[in-house]
Amino acid sequence: MRSMGDADPLTLTAEQLQCLLEDGFRRAFCEIVDTLIGDYGETVMAEEMDFIAEGRSPYELATEEMRAVMTAHEHWFGLPQWGAIRVLPRAIHA
């Protein structure tokens, strides 16, 4: 997997997020999910994502599970919907 290097975080799509190195991807995924829960509430997000309905934390998921969730729910992870722009610089440069 390649690093996104100096990519402008404002231009990252869900597909580009999938290309982050594992640690950066995991960090971005978890922070995005945390932001979604904060913005939309746990009840709404549990209706969207099974692992939340099951009471699982995003941090508990294996990387492949995270990638599957992101693929299945790309509309939640694509810009600008998730509103977590502030987390990407840390994930990209991790």
Image (cartoon, helix red, strand yellow):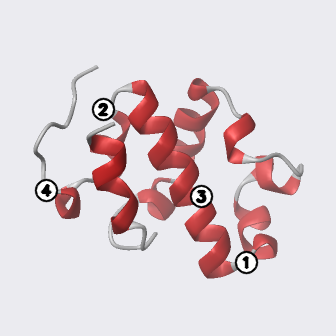
The percent position of residue 45, horizontal first and vertical second, equals 71, 67
> CA gap, disc 3 to disc 4?
21 Å
Q: Quadrant of residue 36?
A: bottom right
Local crowd at mark 3 within 10 Å, few (<14), some, or many (≥20)?
A: many
Work out whether mark 1 precedes mark 4 in sequence or the reverse, and give the earlier one.
4
Q: Which mark is residue 41?
A: 1
Direction from residue 27 to residue 38 in the image, left or right: right
Q: Quadrant of the C terminus?
A: top left
The kind of residue on which mark 1 rests is Gly
Disc 1 and disc 2 in contact, CB within 8 angstroms:
no
Which one is in front in this view, the residue at disc 2 or the one at disc 4?
4
Q: Amino acid at mark 3?
A: Val
Q: Residue at x 33, y 54 (%)?
A: 88
Question: Label 2, on which residue?
Answer: 19
Residue underneath mark 3? 33
Could you tell me how far apart the alpha carbons at marks 1 and 3 are, in whole angstroms?
11 Å
Q: Earlier in the sequence, mark 1 or mark 2?
A: 2
State how far apart marks 1 and 2 are (Cα). 28 Å
Q: Is residue 55 above or below residue 85?
A: above
The answer to whether the residues at label 1 and label 4 have Cβ atoms under 8 Å apart is: no
Q: Amino acid at mark 4?
A: Asp
Q: CA distance from mark 1 to mark 4?
A: 28 Å
In primary-sequence order, the first of circles 1 and 3 is 3
Q: Quadrant of the N terminus?
A: top left
Of marks 3 and 4, which one's residue comes earlier in the chain? 4
Q: Which residue is mark 4?
A: 8
Q: Are marks 2 and 4 in contact (CB under 8 Å)?
A: no
Under circle 3, the secondary element is helix
Q: Is residue 66 above or below residue 13?
A: above
